[in-house]
Image (spheres, rainbow, N blue to C red):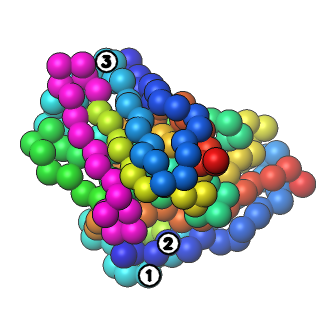
Amino acid sequence: QVQLQESGPGLVRPSQTLSLTCSVSGETVSSGLFYWSWIRQSPGKGLECIGYIYYSGTIYYSPSLKNRAVISVDTSKNQFSLNLNSVTDADTAVYFCARGNKGFQYWGQGTRVFVSS
Amino acid sequence: EIVLTQSPDTLSLSPGERATLSCRASQYVGSNRVAWYQQKPGQAPRLLINAASSRATGIPDRFSGSGSGTDFTLTISRLEPEDFAVYFCQQYGDSPLTFGPGTKVEIK
């Protein structure tokens, strides 16, 4: 059974960097069949795909976040991560990690992140 | 960027009734790469349908998807109590991957 679990701080100060990690079990992040994604959900913007990464190293970012987001994979820990810098109130959301291939079949439970001073 | 529009915003129905949800794309979605998800409060979205009409593993056959090009539909043939939730469409035919704003199916 594939499982994903997000971890990271629930509170980030404005202008700081939001760092989240997704731990994967039941599948290896080095599988070439899937892409590994970060998706966020907020009342104002709905569901937004921040970006996704293939093991090959190919990465796609949402144009609106491209200059602030970095997604990476750590195969030794079977994890992938998101760093989002220069956060503002608009980055307050529930952040999900998910496995993609013809849609997102597996999701983490989500982690709520508040941006506040 | 492909923008997805869903209608209606809210659908008020009774258990046993048929639900028809619409998703319209601002551009052609290649190879019908559209997925549908169900989300309940406090939970992650659950994949129901991909490739516009293929049910995901374990999804009951009362859920069906159809459509092509720019117009897609999710149909729930007979609503069960556990089906009252929010439904999202998503396209994965082009980057950036985008989601619709959702349709809430509520109990009438």
Which region shows up in magenta?
A63-79
As drawn, the residue found furthest toward the left would be: A56
Q: Is residue A46 visible?
A: no
Query: Badge 2: how crowded within 10 Å, few (<14), some, or many (20+)?
Result: many
Tag 3 near tag 2, CB within 8 Å: no
Q: Earlier in the sequence, mark 1 or mark 2?
A: 2
Q: Residue at x 17, y 19 (%)?
A: A76
Q: Which residue is mark 2?
A: B4
Q: Residue at x 32, y 36 (%)?
A: A81
Asked if B65 appears above or below A78 in the picture, the reply is below
- Element class at badge 3: loop
Q: Which residue is mark 3?
A: A26
* Image location (x, y in percent) of residue A73: 22, 34
Q: Are marks 3 and 2 on the same chain?
A: no
Q: Amino acid at mark 3?
A: Gly
Query: Badge 1: how crowded within 10 Å, few (<14), some, or many (20+)?
Result: few
Residue A14 belongs to magenta span: no
Q: Amino acid at mark 1?
A: Ser
For disc 1, the chain is B
- Element class at badge 2: strand
